[in-house]
Image: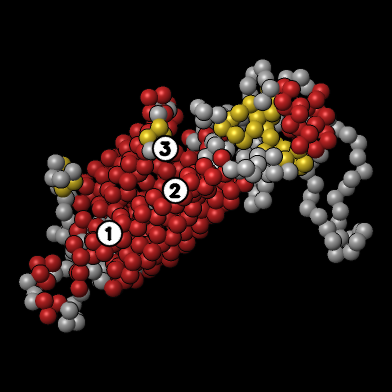
Amino acid sequence: MEVTSNTALEEGQVWGGGNQPLNASYGKMMMWFFIVSDALTFTGFLVSYGFSRFKNINSWPIADEVFTHFPFLHGIDAPMYYVALMTFILIFSSVTMVLAVDAGHHMNKSKVTLYMLLTIIGGAIFVGSQAWEWKNFIKGEYGALETRGGQILQFVNQDTGKRAAIQEFAVGIPSERATHQSSNGIWYQSEKALPNVSVAEVTKGFIADENLVIRTQQLTEDGRKTVLSREASLAKINEAVGVVEGANLIHNEYGNRLFADFFFFITGFHGFHVFSGVVINIIIFFNVILGTYERRGHYEMVEKVGLYWHFVD
Amino acid sequence: MAEEGHKLAIFRGLVKFKSNQQKIWGVLLFLSIVTTIEVALGIIKPQILMGSFLRMKLLNWIFIILTIVKAYYIAWDFMHIRDERSGLKNSIVLPLVILIPYLAFILLLEGDYIFDVMASGFTAWNF
């Protein structure tokens, strides 16, 4: 407010109390320092992701192959397009937030309301999209086998070069094996739901289909996954011990398990930030409608939330 | 308040805006262009950029640089750092500028070292 008069003050007067050092209010400054510390937290996450990636640089999953979905376009390969779209959504909701702050400076209540609403909608779209990405990631696409050492074996059609889904080529073997529930057998013990196909069924289907070969986690020199020959594949499939469909914190059909762990952890943390940002935005939105800031004489609260929101983006 | 507080020039005074709102749209345009370049590069993946520099692809270096450029304009114009006192500005920016590259440098170097140890060691990790 008193940009010019403040600079003219003597050094002793500036820190003497009653005015704002650095010309920023307490709340705004503390929001900034929170953002700095939170930025360092995220740095820690991302750098530890980078650490794990460099540690397993020759077997890390290729992101283009993991995030291939686009809403309403089933079966079409759209690598990373949706991620790019989400980035744009975030930029736009960022802009509406600045516009709301700017309108707040002009004490324009109706404009602040409109822009806050747009920001909330943008944030909600983002959180929803993220939930959708998670769903796809957890559900998986083709399925894979896992060896005892935790290596993932994926299947490729030799002729077309396309990935093969284990559900499609596995040959059914009649089996008595049912999911063990706590209501029968040993009490108070149960197991997780069994996969739809067993290792034996996948192996049988694999041997039956001459065109299938195994693709391992290892990357070749030019950054593609190693595809084994038919003979090597037949030898490799005997090492498999489990069927993996989709991804969770323990198994990951896309490759290295750490990839899934970091994916869930970092995007989960970020999604939680965006979600809380949307909630705070909604609170401020209703305060604006009720005229709280109109009576208070300034819209600084919108500015503080705005800072948080930009950071989250 | 604050109408007089905004500095309206970006690109070191190359582009000047008449009002804060115009500046916001201008910065948005710039950010969109940068993001479009990023997306286009990510889809095309020109062969010329697949070469390696400091053990990372050139393409990834370009992504990192463009992201920093975007973060700069979001912080400077959307979050109004451009208008803050230099004391506050430095106390926010300097810790991040110093600590983040430092942490990234030591941990990535360490990860690379562990990769070498595991690749050339006597224990089989791939079974």
Q: How far is the residue under mark 3 from the one under mark 2?
A: 11 Å
Q: Find disc 2 in the rendering and name its residue.
A: B108
Residue drawn at x 19%, y 58% is B83
Q: Is residue A40 above or below residue B22?
A: below
Q: Nearer the viewer, mark 1 or mark 2?
A: 2
Are labels 3 and 1 on one chain? yes
Q: Label 2's element? A: helix
Chain letter of disc 3? B
Looking at the picture, tell me which residue is in the foreground, B110 or B25.
Answer: B110
Label 1 is placed on what type of residue?
Answer: Leu
Residue drawn at x 92%, y 58% is A184
Q: Label 3's element? A: strand
Label 2 is placed on what type of residue?
Answer: Leu
Circle on res. B94: 1
Residue drawn at x 18%, y 43% is B11
Q: Residue furthest front?
A: B122
Circle on res. B56: 3
* Residue B39 visible somewhere in the drawing: no
Chain letter of disc 1? B
Residue drawn at x 81%, y 39% is A198
Looking at the picture, tell me which residue is in the foreground, A106 or A83.
Answer: A83
Q: Label 1's element? A: helix
Q: Earlier in the sequence, mark 3 or mark 2?
A: 3
Q: Nearer the viewer, mark 3 or mark 1?
A: 3
Q: Is the C-beta separation of discs 1 and 2 under 8 Å?
A: no
Q: Position of residue B47 (x, y in %)?
A: 41, 24
Whether residue B14 sits left or right of residue B124 in the image: it is left
